[in-house]
Amino acid sequence: MIRLFSYSLSLRLLAIFLLLAALFAWGVVAGIRWAYSADDLRAVISGHLSLHVDYVRNDIGSPPRLDRALAITQRVPVDIFIAGPDVRWSSDPAFPDPDTLDFGPSDYFSAEPDALFDELEGVVFAVHERHRYLRFSEGDYDITVVTPKIAETRTRPPLIPILVGFALLLVLCGYLAVRWLFRPVATIREGAAYIGAGHFGHRIRTHRDDELGELAGDINLMAGKVEGMLDAKRQLLLGVSHELRSPLSRMRLGLELLEEQEAARSLRQDVDEMRSIVETLLEGERVGSTHAALHLTDVALDELVQQLATRYFHDEPRLRIQMDAAGTAQLDAARIQLMLKNLVGNALRYSRPEDGPVILSVQGNEREAVFRVRDFGPGIAPDQREHLGEPFYRSDASRARETGGTGLGLFLARQIARAHGGDLGLIDPDGPGALFEVRLPRRRGAATAHSRS
């Protein structure tokens, strides 16, 4: 409950409203009590009661006359009981015996004697069965007045349950109002998360003209600007890569005509590496675009992995394959093999033979297939994890050919995974090394749903 309260803006705002309402009610009551002291209230009430007693005494007379007492009960909603030496009369036969009632001074008149209460001396009060009784003496006669009439059965509804129910109703109405007020927050949050996942063409739709509507508009504007900048960057990279292919091909052809020397071999390797970079960039942009051209077929996962090992790693004794889940999935077999080739190649490159094997495992369930590549090398530093998958980023800053590649392997692998509706991530292994995980939906429909989650 505490965690929900600290998380929910609606509950905290409602709590602030309730606290302010409680403080306001307390302030009103305290102000009334301060403005009208107990002495003032006693003075007002005692004045009214004094007039009431005087009216009854004057109307009944002394000694009391029964016809006048009966006339009072016909004009005013009260009943009267008169007891004296020669009379014992009541306006209603059901009037209880006053001697059985517990009379005493009212709370308002329990203070020390004051001039205000001189006229009320000898007046006592009692409450019985929701009727209020007032008793005073007139000579040898005791007169008891009750309101309302004995015949009037005043049934009051229970006050506390009504107040509690009304308070709960107010709280519910306030909560619903706050929820309506902040209803666009959930839409904005989901839209921002979807845009943050890379879907910059998405726009948050709200029908509010308040500050939350302006916030959604600002996020949409930001997404449009980011999309424009990324498109410009992608077009520049694509254009440069495309323009480099022709001169690189001519350079490679010219180098083939040179004599077989060490310098020529080194230049050929450099040109081949540059061409590989250009082709990788072009492939990454193709699969990373919104109209990725994937050749999807039903691929048997066990055959896919075995073909990968035979084609690229047939002479690599360190590679271990674990098939925990077989079956088929709708994949672009060539691109998935390229993705796994880059992941396994990185694991072999950054771990030493004495560190242990590199494990390629296939797991999953009916909805998705999970590929994992595990090595037992030095692992990846925490400050480098957020940069993995960026173009040209390498954990080895020297960029020497002996210690690593071009920094495009993970970039292309992630692009291929996302083109299939999945993603590539780095998870913490049990022990040393690094563990890369690729989750891909088995069916294209699931891929679309996954990419929008």
Image: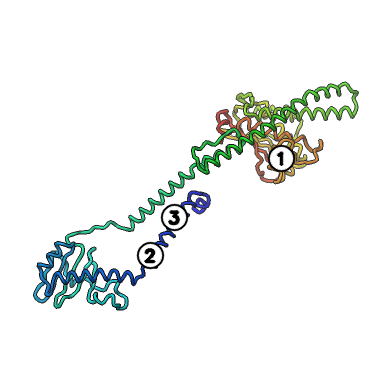
Front residue (pair 347, 75)? 75
Q: Nearer the viewer, mark 3 or mark 2?
A: 2
Residue type marked 2: Ile
Decide if residue 153 is on the left or right side of residue 334: left
Q: Is residue 279 above or below residue 398?
A: above
Q: Nearer the viewer, mark 2 or mark 1?
A: 2
Marker disc for residue 375: 1
Q: Nearer the viewer, mark 1 or mark 3?
A: 3
Decide if residue 445 is on the left or right side of residue 121: right
Q: CA distance from mark 3 to mark 2?
A: 21 Å
CB atoms of marks 2 and 1 within 8 Å: no
Q: Dot 2 corresponds to which residue?
A: 32
N-terminal of the two: label 3 or label 2? 3
Q: Residue at x 50, y 50 (%)?
A: 4
Q: Dot 3 corresponds to which residue?
A: 18
Front residue (pair 266, 134)? 134
Q: Residue at x 31, y 58 (%)?
A: 159
Residue 103 picture location, percent across and down: 23, 72
Question: Which type of secondary structure does the marked residue at label 3 adopt?
Answer: helix
Residue 411 visible in the picture: yes
N-terminal of the two: label 1 or label 3? 3
Residue type marked 3: Leu
Question: Which type of secondary structure does the marked residue at label 2 adopt?
Answer: helix
Q: Is residue 192 above or below residue 129?
A: above
Which image quarter: residue 119?
Answer: bottom left
Residue type marked 1: Asp
Q: Residue at x 86, y 22 (%)?
A: 254
Q: Badge 2: how crowded within 10 Å, few (<14), some, or many (20+)?
A: few
